[in-house]
């Protein structure tokens, strides 16, 4: 017994060494590395092994490979859930001009297979996450302290700040690959994985913080940048001696400057405080209330095993989420590091309080939808098992690897927390229309798709079955949705497109105004892989009503390339209900 234990320890050591020196530096498929596999088997760590039968993509329809990590013997299937697996993590795809690129960002290898997620004991009290501007300096000092403690842990500890920051890189820069499909990344942005992934990320960071602080009541404060009281970067983060400070932030955006939820990369709007707040309120209203009336409009598009990444983001992920990443990061660095770049965002301690607010917005959206739909929970989630059973790996406070599914992340109270009630002044900030901005409609030039956008284009888009929308009673009317198809970001650059309806003279519309139906925002991507080819959807019902054009058979859509080179494949309006 003793002997076999020390043999195991020795072999484990060899395995770790081999993993560090060989396998982890190899690109893509672990199946090519028979050495590490042999050792895994010899150490009886073969639960790590996944069948490598047909690792080379495309032909297979049915099971891709067995995921033996999972106790319930899950099998990854094309069209099924996206499964994350440590053996399918390798080099990230980081922009070449990154100032300090990570050569890898996979988490440390776990010595045992992941355990399945379990909910905290329901007898534990539900803890409140509170906004930075309310918790006070003493409480913020705790966050400061725990970030310092995490920064002091050895880099090899999965709970260290170094490794926690890497989690974002691993899931967003092509390091994780889909099990059995080494050409396809696991990408948690621009799809229905966005909200649940980031909730799980914060959940474990918070548990780790509690453990390190030895304070079971600790919760992550959140930065409520959506309300006037919270629109500046919290003071603790700009103090250069604080562990919360990050030099990779835009110096122009320090207090007293207000967040710009409609930020055009590197361009300041120079609005008065009052105007900026108004713009921010309108952005919030449109993205959460009128623009996200269906689950897929809010969460983003379906993304299943075998799918290319980035099928299409939800409203909030584009704006304000991506805008604010760019606003916080420093535009003088090529990719807007830290917050403006996927690979680097988790390095900034502000990321976690920033995303606390995104997680809270998920709750507010759900409450708004429940109120609008007679408390019908089915209108606030997808029932598709490919979503519910998609899974991620995180290390918990005891440094145990845990497999978490989307299904586990749908109820914060079951996860042991809720958000304190903060006012939502934007919930009623329905923007007024701008008169006289569409008089040049008669002289539209014809546009042939696909088109590279060098300048704004205005296109007349037919509405489907306008009669049906007109006579349908409000509550059973389908949502009319503008689909911008085949968006291709051409040189992987930062991109912002503004989409206006019935505003050929769009420059007359105030920032965030009614005719601005939505913005497409994409942070900079590395040019080699994981290219941005995606779609965007914009809900139109309320907008058409406010513009007084519900009876018309077509609308004018104006697309303004604010930043970056982009091609779009086409525009259409469809009816959607979910
Ligand atoms: Cu994973 Cu705010 O991004």
Image (cartoon, rainbow, N blue to C red):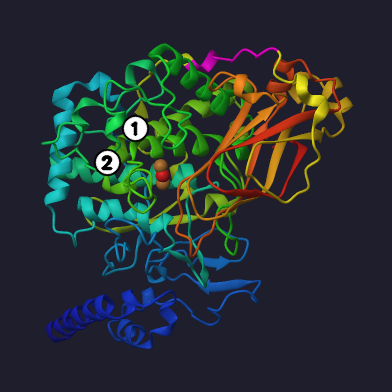
**Which is nearer the N-term, disc 1 or disc 2?**
2
Please identify the quarter of the rendering in which residue 517 is found. Answer: top right
User: Local crowd at mark 2 within 10 Å, few (<14), some, or many (≥20)?
Assistant: many
* Circle 1 or circle 2, nearest the eye: 2
Instruction: Tell me the tag on residue 169.
Output: none
For residue 504, above or below residue 462: above
Type of secondary structure dominating the magenta stretch: loop
- Height in image: 42 above or below 532? below
Q: Residue 118 location in percent, x, y? A: 37, 49
Asked if 534 appears above or below 222 in the picture, the reply is below
Which quarter of the picture shows residue 554?
Answer: top right
Q: Name the residue under label 1.
A: 417
Q: Where is residue 536 in the image (x, y as percent from the top left)?
A: 63, 42
Question: In the rendered view of the protein, which quadrant contains the C terminus?
Answer: top right
Near-viewer residue (253 or 225) = 253
Q: Give the range drawn in magenta.
A: 426-435
Mark 1, secondary structure of its residue: strand
Mark 1 near ligand 1 (CB under 8 Å)? no
Q: Does the magenta stretch include residue 430?
A: yes
Q: In which quarter of the image is ligand 1?
A: top left
- For the point 21% across and 26% down, the residue is 235
Q: Inspect the magenta stretch and tell me whether residue 465 lies in it.
A: no
Residue at label 2? 206
Residue 33 location (% of width, % of height): 38, 84
Q: Position of residue 319 (x, y in %)?
A: 50, 34
- Is residue 62 visible in the rendered image? The answer is yes
How far is disc 1 from disc 2 in space, using C-alphas? Answer: 11 Å
Q: Which of 99 and 321 is in front in this view?
A: 99
């Amino acid at each position: 017994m003793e002997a076999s234990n020390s043999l195991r320890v020795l072999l484990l050591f060899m395995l770790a060494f081999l993993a560090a020196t060989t396998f982890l530096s190899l690109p893509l498929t672990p199946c090519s590395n028979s050495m590490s596999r042999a050792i895994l088997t010899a150490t009886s760590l073969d639960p790590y092994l996944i069948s490598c039968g047909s690792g080379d993509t495309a032909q297979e329809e049915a099971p891709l490979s067995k995921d033996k990590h999972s106790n319930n013997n899950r099998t990854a299937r094309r069209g099924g859930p996206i499964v994350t697996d440590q053996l399918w993590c390798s080099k990230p795809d980081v922009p070449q001009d990154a100032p300090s690129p990570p050569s890898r960002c996979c988490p440390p290898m776990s010595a045992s297979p992941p355990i399945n997620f379990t909910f905290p004991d329901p007898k534990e009290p539900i803890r409140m996450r509170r906004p930075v501007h309310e918790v006070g300096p003493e409480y913020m000092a705790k966050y400061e302290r725990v970030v310092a403690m995490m920064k002091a842990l050895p880099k090899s500890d999965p709970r260290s700040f170094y490794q926690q920051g890497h989690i974002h890189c691993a899931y967003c820069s092509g390091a994780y690959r889909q099990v059995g499909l080494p050409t396809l990344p696991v990408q948690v942005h621009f799809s229905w994985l966005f909200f649940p992934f980031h909730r799980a990320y914060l959940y474990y960071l918070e548990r780790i913080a509690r453990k390190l602080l030895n304070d079971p009541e600790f919760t992550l404060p959140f930065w409520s940048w959506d309300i006037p009281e919270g629109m500046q970067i919290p003071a603790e983060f700009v103090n250069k001696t604080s562990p919360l400070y990050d030099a990779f932030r835009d110096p122009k955006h320090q207090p007293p400057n207000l967040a710009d939820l409609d930020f055009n990369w590197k361009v300041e709007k120079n609005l008065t405080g009052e105007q900026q707040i108004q713009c921010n309120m309108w952005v919030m209203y449109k993205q959460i209330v009128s623009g996200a009336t269906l689950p897929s409009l809010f969460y983003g598009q379906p993304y299943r095993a075998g799918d290319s990444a980035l099928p299409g983001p939800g409203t909030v992920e584009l704006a304000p989420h991506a805008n604010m990443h760019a606003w916080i990061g420093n535009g003088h660095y090529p990719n807007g590091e830290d917050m403006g770049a996927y690979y680097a965002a988790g390095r900034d301690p502000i990321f976690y309080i920033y995303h606390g607010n995104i997680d809270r917005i998920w709750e507010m959206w759900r409450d708004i939808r429940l109120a609008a739909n007679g408390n019908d929970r089915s209108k606030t989630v997808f029932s598709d098992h490919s979503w519910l059973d998609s899974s991620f790996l995180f290390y918990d406070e005891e440094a145990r690897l845990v497999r978490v599914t989307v299904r586990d992340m749908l109820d914060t109270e079951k996860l042991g927390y809720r958000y304190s009630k903060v006012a939502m002044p934007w919930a009623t900030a329905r923007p007024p229309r701008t008169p006289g901005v569409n008089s040049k409609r008669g002289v539209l030039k014809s546009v042939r798709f696909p088109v590279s956008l060098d300048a704004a284009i205005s296109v007349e888009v037919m509405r489907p079955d306008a009669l049906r929308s007109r006579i349908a009673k409000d509550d059973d009317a389908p949502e009319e949705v503008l689909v911008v198809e085949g968006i291709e970001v051409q040189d992987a650059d930062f991109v912002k497109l503004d989409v206006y309806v019935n505003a050929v003279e769009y420059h007359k519309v105030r920032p965030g105004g009614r005719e601005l139906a939505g913005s497409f925002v994409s942070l900079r991507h590395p040019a080699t892989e994981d290219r941005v080819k995606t779609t965007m959807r914009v809900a139109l019902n309320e907008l058409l009503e406010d513009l007084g054009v519900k009876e018309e058979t077509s609308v004018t859509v104006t697309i303004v390339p604010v930043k970056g080179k982009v091609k779009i494949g086409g525009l259409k309006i469809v009816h959607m209900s979910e």
